[in-house]
Image: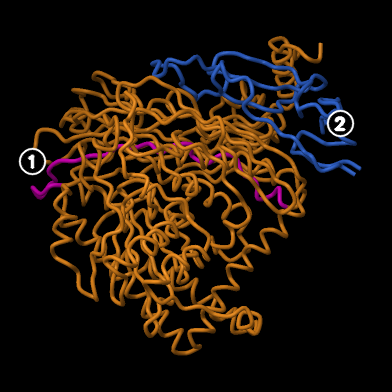
Chain colours: A orange, B blue
């Protein structure tokens, strides 16, 4: 069913404007601090480095602050949040090391606010704005709730601080706000454009009531709101101290130079890399419950001199479901890869980095959707798939450079394996738990090394997997295991990092069942692609074993280590489903590893043997995919391995066809 | 002068060669894997943990696809892609190699 455009919604479909335009639009209503080019030029290197590192430390400290105040495991244990310090017109000066996908769009929300809120209701000292509208920016789906605040020096806006974190429930049809039956945004949590929720230093109770009224767990979301207020306060105190010590002009000059430095140094790197074009397609299976469609994001990366163009022309039309993302999702999909592959030794100043590339996208497509398309899964659907395509193209580009190729990486955990539980916890209170175990995704292999096993997510350098004991303490769950899964890393000369699996039962809930929301792509085809002949990682695989004998097995003292040990009705979970999990059910989820690099037939046989010994690769995969035959003691049978690799090459040749144009 | 394209490919005066056996995979002006062999098959060929199709969650037909060097049968590109998608992953260097 096509969505009908909503007149007036174009006001919120934001494309960030250049700084000068934002300044011109906001200036009649607010005073904006500025600094001369001469002041930036005059800045001495020592002061620059001291203040720059202090700004970086402030974003780290914001992370400490939010973790100490939040009560949500997705924040306290998974680090699914991030921060940014922005200049007076919303150019991002410094981004934290947490979820880089989220903070990549803080600039959009701040610029939109300057353009649309300066006159009415006005922007004053002590104000803070809340936003979870993915079309405006600040986050990629409604659960990404940002809170950003102007920092005044005198009567001028000197800078902005921004905090954004995933909230486990912000309303909508389904628990956790993952509306798997969504056909448009009206099935989902209401997107909220920038709203002055803190005014003159006071949290407005009327606005807070409106905000929390939509949530299933308002107390927890209220606590997270205060955590973000606290993180902003802390950052502003630190920035005020810097201004008092070094002067506003000096700190601003540092900000300007950080942005310029990031741009110049990225451009210098790009200039060294051969020009060319790299293309990729990333797939998503199913847009909502009951849908069996396949959705493509197509990318052509063009690199010419010191400028890149990410061209998504040809991407599929926006879907009748929840997988779409807005333009913020494209930016959030690009920036994490850019930061980790090209900017490890540069200031993480997105304001400068964004100058080095253009984005071509078509409004009305899955990664640039128009209102009111469904977007409640945008962050881990089309934005994530955008990250996959960008990873392939940027890594392909880096692979062409002798030195920078070491920073290339195959796709990391190609999709998020969502299992969300909701109901009554062991204390009789309501709970919503986004199971965070897939935070231990496999990282992609590189041209000189294996991917990191259960190493995390590409977009959250500081991400963590929640502690099992903490999950069991907080929610009515009993884990049977959480572990790495053999063969889940994409085979290659360098193997992709392993993904993992978990199995758990509902335990000690006063209710007879809990709600289960399943939402994860990568089940019909693998989404962690390999590079240079490397194989993709595993497909995602989730199973509910209904009416199982698990309690009988546990009462007998049986340690269950394989889901096949559990008797009952094994029900493979489709990509999207809202269902229940009963007290006798077992839930198993296996998420993806990272893609491989190079031909697995080129992998050192001893490395394969070591993997088999460590149970990272099975003997069958060693023989059939890597062509390595092992003795009974798991050492390499070299003669048999040579013959097996010859045989695999013969089989490949027998199955291959000549290309049409070369016959 | 040779230029690296990736682990498997080298560009020499615009021609793309296999880095392992020197077989010419593309003449100047052709896509990088233009003369590579193509192997197709069931997605299970992508590895023991690739379960695509059981059960069938999507309508579209998908396949395992591999580009191979005609000289040494090294895998140059391995993917699972929709059967209908002919062009998925391509590399074109435009900077001269010498």
Q: Is residue A394 above or below residue A16?
A: above
User: Would you identify the image quadrant in which residue A647 lies?
Assistant: top right
Residue A581 falls left or right of residue A467: left
Secondary structure of the residue carrying numbered label 1: loop
Q: Which mark is residue A510?
A: 1
Residue in view at x 53 percent, y 32 percent: A282
The residue that mark 2 highlights is: B15
Q: Is residue B90 above or below residue A49?
A: above
Q: Residues within 10 Å of mark 2 (few under 14, many from 20)?
A: some
User: Would you identify the image quadrant in which residue A41 lies?
Assistant: bottom right
- Gap in Å between the C-alphas at discs 2 and 1? 69 Å
Q: Name the chain under label 1.
A: A
Secondary structure of the residue carrying numbered label 2: strand
Residue in view at x 45 percent, y 71 percent: A88
| Magenta run includes residue A381 | no
- Marks 2, 1: nearer the viewer: 2
The residue closer to the viewer here, A14 or A455, is A14
Q: Residue A537: in sight, yes or no?
A: no
Residue in view at x 74 percent, y 19 percent: A643
Q: Are marks 2 and 1 on the same chain?
A: no
Q: Name the chain under label 2.
A: B
Residue A101 is situated, as x and y percent measured from the top left of the image, at 45, 51
Q: Is residue A190 above or below residue A566?
A: below
User: Would you identify the image quadrant in which residue A645 lies?
Assistant: top right
Q: Residue A51: in sight, yes or no?
A: yes
Q: Which residues are magenta?
A: A404-430
Q: Which mark is residue A8?
A: none
Extreme-front residue of the structure? A28
């Amino acid at each position: 069913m096509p969505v009908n455009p909503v007149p007036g919604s174009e006001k919120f479909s934001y494309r960030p404007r250049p700084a000068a335009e934002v300044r011109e639009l906001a200036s009649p209503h607010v005073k904006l601090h500025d600094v001369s080019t001469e002041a930036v030029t005059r800045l001495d290197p020592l002061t620059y480095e001291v203040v720059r590192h202090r700004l970086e430390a402030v974003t780290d400290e914001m992370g400490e602050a939010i973790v100490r105040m939040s009560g949500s495991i997705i924040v306290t244990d998974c680090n699914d949040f991030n921060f940014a310090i922005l200049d007076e017109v919303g150019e991002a000066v410094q981004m934290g090391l947490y979820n880089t996908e989220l903070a990549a769009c803080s600039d959009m929300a701040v610029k939109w606010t300057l353009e649309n809120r300066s006159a009415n209701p006005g922007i004053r000292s002590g104000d803070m704005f809340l936003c979870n509208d993915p079309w405006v920016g600040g986050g990629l789906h409604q659960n990404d709730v940002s809170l950003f605040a102007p920092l005044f020096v005198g009567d001028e806006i000197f800078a902005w601080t921004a905090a954004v974190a995933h909230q486990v429930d912000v309303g909508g049809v389904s628990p956790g706000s993952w509306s798997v039956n969504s056909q448009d945004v009206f099935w989902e949590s209401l997107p909220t454009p920038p709203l002055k929720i803190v005014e003159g230093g006071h949290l407005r109770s009327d606005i807070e009531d409106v905000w929390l009224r939509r949530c299933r767990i308002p107390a927890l979301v209220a606590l997270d709101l205060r955590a973000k207020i606290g993180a902003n306060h802390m950052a502003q105190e630190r920035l005020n101290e810097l201004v008092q010590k070094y002067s506003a002009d000096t700190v601003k000059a540092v900000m300007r130079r950080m942005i310029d430095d990031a741009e110049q140094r990225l451009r210098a790197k790009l200039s060294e890399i051969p020009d060319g074009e790299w293309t990729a397609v990333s797939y998503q299976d199913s847009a909502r419950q009951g849908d069996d469609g396949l959705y493509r994001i197509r990318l052509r990366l063009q690199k010419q001199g010191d400028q890149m163009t990410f061209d998504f022309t040809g991407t599929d039309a926006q879907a009748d479901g929840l997988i779409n993302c807005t333009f913020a999702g494209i930016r959030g999909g690009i920036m994490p890869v850019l930061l980790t592959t090209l900017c490890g030794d540069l200031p993480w100043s997105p304001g400068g980095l964004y100058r080095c590339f253009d984005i071509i996208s078509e409004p009305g497509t899955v990664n640039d959707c128009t209102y009111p398309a469904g977007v409640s899964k945008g962050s881990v659907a089309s934005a994530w798939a955008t990250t996959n395509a960008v990873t392939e193209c940027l890594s392909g580009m880096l692979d062409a450079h002798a030195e920078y190729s070491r920073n290339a990486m195959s796709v990391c955990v190609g999709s998020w394996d969502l299992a969300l539980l909701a109901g009554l916890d062991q204390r009789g209170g309501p709970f919503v738990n986004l199971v965070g175990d897939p935070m231990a995704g496999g990282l992609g292999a590189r041209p000189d090394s294996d991917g990191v096993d259960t190493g995390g997510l590409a977009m959250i350098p500081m991400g963590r997997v929640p502690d099992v004991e903490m999950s069991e303490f907080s929610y009515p769950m009993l884990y049977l295991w959480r572990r790495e899964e053999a063969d889940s890393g994409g085979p290659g000369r360098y193997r992709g990092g392993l993904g993992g699996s978990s199995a758990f039962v509902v335990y000690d809930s006063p209710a007879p069942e809990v709600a289960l929301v399943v939402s994860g792509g990568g089940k019909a085809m693998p989404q962690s692609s390999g590079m240079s002949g490397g194989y993709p990682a595993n497909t995602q695989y989730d199973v509910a074993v209904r009416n199982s004998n698990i309690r009988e097995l546990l009462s007998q003292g049986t340690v269950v280590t394989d889901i096949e040990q559990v008797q009952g009705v094994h029900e493979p979970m489709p990509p999207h489903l809202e269902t229940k999990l009963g007290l006798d059910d077992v839930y198993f989820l296996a998420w993806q590893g990272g893609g491989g690099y190079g031909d697995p037939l080129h992998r050192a046989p001893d490395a394969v043997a070591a993997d088999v010994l460590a149970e990272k690769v099975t003997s069958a995969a060693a023989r059939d995919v890597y062509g390595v035959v092992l003795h009974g003691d798991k050492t390499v049978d070299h003669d048999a391995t040579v013959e097996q690799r010859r045989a695999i090459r013969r089989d490949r040749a027998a199955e291959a066809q000549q290309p049409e144009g070369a016959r | 002068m040779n230029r690296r394209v990736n682990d498997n490919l080298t560009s020499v005066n615009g021609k793309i060669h296999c880095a392992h056996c020197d077989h010419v995979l593309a003449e100047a002006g052709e896509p990088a894997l233009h003369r590579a062999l193509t192997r197709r098959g069931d997605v299970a060929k992508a590895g023991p943990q690739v379960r695509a199709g059981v059960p069938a969650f999507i309508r579209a037909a998908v396949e395992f696809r591999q580009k191979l060097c005609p000289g040494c049968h090294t895998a140059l590109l391995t993917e699972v892609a929709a059967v209908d998608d002919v062009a998925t992953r391509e590399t074109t260097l435009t900077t001269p190699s010498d």
